[in-house]
Amino acid sequence: MRWYRGWYRQSSRLMVLFVVLAAVMTASFTGSHALAQTGTNSDTKIEQIVKGLGNTHTDVTDDLAVLKTDQHAAVTFLVGELHPIPRKVYFERTKTKDARHIVSCLQALHYLTGLTFTAGTESRLTDDETQFLDFSNAMHDSNPDHRLHFFGIWMSRDAYFVAPVDAQHKIIDQWKQWQNQYGNSFQYIPSGTPKDSIDHWYWFG
């Protein structure tokens, strides 16, 4: 019987060890799954906010405050939304959902990265377009080469002046190239809350 008791004790120890290892593995898997689920939920919320930018009842500054909590994910979704819109002046009554959305996405990118891209055009500009899209050394912007912004805003009317489509394409391409190279690694701290620093990101993109 001695051999039996020895075998039984050894088997019991192995069983306890197995149970402990199983518990540790289960806890590890559960923790990892919870973290992954949390990340997925966070990305989903960021994506939903990005897709609704400019066209919800939420103040855009409140949306930007949330996007600021995960700048890299937000920038990825924002760049993915960019596409050209018709070249025109969008007054408040004529702003389309698409125009509001794209302008808001560019404003968000400006706020979250501190960047704005410009481009040349083959089109002839009106005097008003030149004033609002090619503003050298104004609005915290230096533009000695007279390249165009995607949009500029007429402050007193809150109207969008949108650049010719060829310039829009070039600007979007620059955002995509920057995103591919730096989107997951850039380090930028906005100068303040979206509401406190609105003059640094609202007026052009």
Image (cartoon, grey):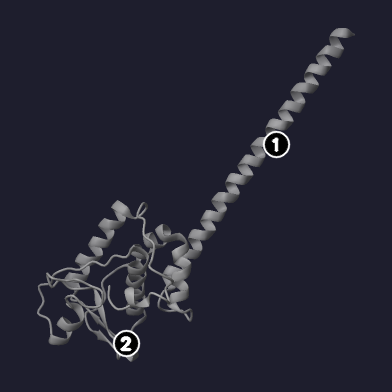
Is 204 on the left-hand or right-hand side of 40?
A: left
Q: Nearer the viewer, residue 169 or 60?
A: 60
Instruction: Tell me the SS state at disc 2.
Output: loop
User: Could you give the CA–CA distance between mark 2 and mark 1, rounded to whole angstroms?
Assistant: 61 Å
* Viewer-side residue, 145 vs 95: 145
Residue 23 circle label: 1
Q: For residue 158, which numbered disc appears in the image?
A: 2
Q: Depth-wise, is mark 2 or mark 1 nearer the camera?
A: 2
Q: Residue furthest top?
A: 2
Pointer 2 or 1: first along the chain: 1
Q: Give the structural element (helix, strand or loop) at label 1.
A: helix
Query: Along the horizontal axis of the image, is 21 left or right of 126?
Result: right
Whether residue 41 sits left or right of residue 99 in the image: it is right
Three-letter code, disc 2: Asp
Answer whether residue 47 is visible to the viewer in this image. no
Q: Amino acid at mark 1?
A: Ala
Residue 50 x %, y %: 42, 68
Q: Up-down: is 166 above or below 1?
A: below
Q: Quadrant of the C terminus?
A: bottom left
